[in-house]
Amino acid sequence: MKLAVEAHLGRLEATIDVDCHSLGVVGPSGAGKSTLLDVIAGIEPGRVVLDGRDLTGVAIDERRIGLVPQESHLFPHLSVRENLAFAASDIDFIASALQVTTLLDRPPRILSGGEKRRVALGRALASEPSLLLLDEPFAGLDALRRREAMALLADVRRRFNVPMVVVSHVPEEIIGLTDQAIRLDGGRVVASGASPSVLRAGETEIDCHFEGEVVAPGRVRVGSTELAVSVAATGRVRLGCYARDVILATEMPRGLSARNCVWTGIESVTAAGDAVLIALNEPPVKALVTREAATALELGAGKRVVAIIKATSIAYLGTA
Amino acid sequence: MSPVVLSLIVGAAATLVSLPGAVAVAWIIERSKAPGRGLLQVVVMLPLVLPPVVTGYLLLWLFSPRGWLGWTGVAFHTLGAVVAAAVVGFPLFVMNISLAMKAVDPRLETVARTLGCSRWQAFRRVTLPLAWPGILSGAVLAFARGLGEFGATIVLAGRIPGETETIPLAIYGLLDRVNRDHSLEWLVGASIAIAVACVFVSRAFDLRHRRRLGL
């Protein structure tokens, strides 16, 4: 998507012009992130151009921009099914993609926070939006639920192929979901660029999601490699691994407790704040290393390295 | 027609007639950004603070044969009692509907808009059903208020037995008479019973309103 936004509203003084698949918006509370989403959705005034279509002055209901608000805002008088069907007639596919099929006849008030968010996401997707706005989609979820939700969202993005603007005050949450990001602070854009580049020191929990096939107890085939993973499920599974937990070596180490040492190639090298994010071919994970390490090992695209991942560092995030 | 039946008919008619207007006015005051809604609020609330007799006088002036609405033939007719009850009960009705709408998160309407609903559709599919039990609760109170209407009714509609003589007017008429058949006590009792029932019904709707909103 090509998205240009110009917002002058209260403290928010932002001009954005990006061309990416999904945009991350990070920054502290009160930075104007939610207001920016409201401007894009047409709830608040501002200049918005999406894929060459000038939406400035176009009514909210004619923009076809889906909004998943932070508090979900499900319609309390409607069941989950009726919420999903609010703007669509066929909801079976969406219900199964968001794993809410068993909740369809429940009223929203008895759902958990994570379930509400999945329904709100499904409701927005059902309206077939040309852009999806997600406001703090993982706030309030515990660590594991958050990783599950991120994996699900990555899956949704792939399946529905809908561009997203994802807002979060925790950058790590959106690095795995977006390719471009901006950092808002005090209503102004203070940084923008490739998602990892807007990271700051310490914000390094970049989660990488990938899928594999369980071939034996504790063994998962990912592409052409096989990884040791503590997983009890069978069939296709979704896995997650933090980039800071992946170690790179230029030769095969010996006598190591880590169960996974695999030769792989470097796909790309991106500056991530004061560190370097290295994307690997197989398994498709990223490794976060310091600049010094990257320089010392002469890490660059195309180079062959050994990726070292502890089996316990790979989290099982549900069946695929 | 007995004063009790007449009162119930007049009260119900007044409530039904004012329902759409009260919902519209409450929406304008509560949800729209229309200019002059402050003035609208003042005008709508006037009958609440004006002496009912004054309201009745203004209505009579409006509905008198030479008034703007004289052609309707409402004055000194059952319809006059309905108009008086509707006008005097209107502020209470609007206030209750406003409260019911205020309790509905406006963000829900906004979300409905992002899902492709026009303003009207968002109101009809989200705010109205969510506020509906609250609106009914207000309707019952407005109905009860209409039953007790005296001042404006007697000025605009007079006290015509069987036609405009509602419970309060009948009670007034019986006050200075030697009362042998206990009809006065009967009317007072009926009045109290209806009022108590209305309060209970209104409360029940109110609880449903809160449950529906998940409060």
Image (spheres, rainbow, N blue to C red):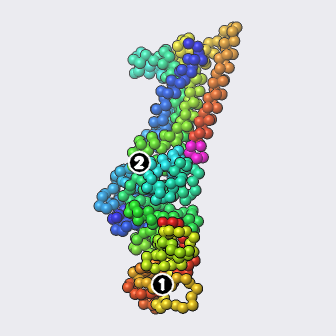
* B198 to the left or right of B32: right
For image coordinates 48% across by 29% down, the residue present is: B18
Q: What secondary structure predominates along the stretch shown in magenta?
A: loop
Can the viewer see residue B38? no
Say which of A74 and A259 sits in front.
A259
Residue bearing mark 1: A262
Quarter of the view holding residue B32: top left
Measure the C-alpha gap from mark 2 to mark 1: 48 Å
Say which of A217 and B28 sits in front.
A217
Say which of A86 and B6 sits in front.
A86
Q: Position of residue A285 (x, y in %)?
A: 46, 77
Q: Are the residues at dot 2 and dot 1 in contact (C-beta closer than 8 Å)?
A: no
Judging from the image, mark 1 belongs to the subunit labelled A
Q: Is mark 1 on a helix, strand or loop?
A: strand
Q: In this view, does A215 lie above or below A35?
A: below
Amino acid type of the residue that numbered disc 2 sits on in the rendered structure: Ser
Say which of A226 and B60 sits in front.
A226
| Magenta extent | B211-215
For image coordinates 40% across by 70% down, the residue present is: A180
For image coordinates 46% across by 51% down, the residue present is: A84
Q: In this view, does A21 lie above or below B138?
A: below
Identify the disc placed on residue A89: 2
Amino acid type of the residue that numbered disc 1 sits on in the rendered structure: Val
